[in-house]
Image (spheres, rainbow, N blue to C red):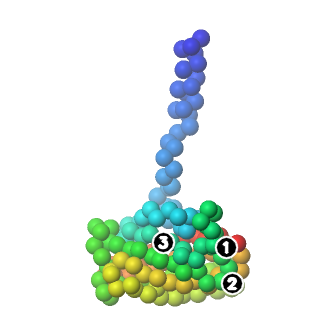
Amino acid sequence: MINYFWTLLFLGLISCGPMNGTPPESTNTRNTPSMGNNVSQSSKESHFLISISNKTQNSFIIPQTQLGDNDYVIRIAHADLRRLSPEGQVTLTYGMPDMPEMGKETITATSQGDGTTFEATLFFSMSGTWEISLNIKDQLIEDTYVFTELVK
């Protein structure tokens, strides 16, 4: 009877499959970059490591992106951990995928002079899901990173 129990438990665990939470390789979106999780993510072609935080969150318990201006801090390094050159540039293009007629806004993030930190203020005019695309360019290397924010 006991061996039967352990056999069923073992088979049940095996049938769950991998549970490491790793997204498929084609996935390059992050649904909640401002959940207090500063884990670095790779850009689409894995040229850069990126960490994004929203300084304008209105709650420490359940961080939420809010209507109006939201101040983002973007930390970027080359995949081999080199800093970006002084000519490095980060642009953000954002809009609502469910409302393409609204168009998209593009802004250039401001470098903080250390080769890794950039800041940008995004204005969210209405509630809903917003898609934000970072375009990172440093010397001859260019790559993108796309994530979404739920504005409430």
The numbered dot on residue 125 is 2
Q: Residue at x 39, y 79 (%)?
A: 117
The image shows residue 18, relative to residue 51, as above or below, that is above
Q: Residue at x 54, y 84 (%)?
A: 121
Q: Is residue 85 visible?
A: yes
The numbered dot on residue 52 is 3
Q: Residues within 10 Å of mark 1 (few under 14, many from 20)?
A: some
Front residue of 104/88: it is 88
Q: Position of residue 93 (x, y in %)?
A: 54, 82
- From the viewer's perspective, is 40 left or right of 94? left
Query: What residue is pinned by disc 1?
Result: 151
Q: Are marks 1 and 2 in contact (CB under 8 Å)?
A: no
Of helix, strand and loop, which one carries label 3? strand
Q: Residue furthest front?
A: 60
Q: Position of residue 129 (x, y in %)?
A: 66, 72
Q: Residue at x 59, y 70 (%)?
A: 148
Tell me the quarter of the image containing the N terminus. top right
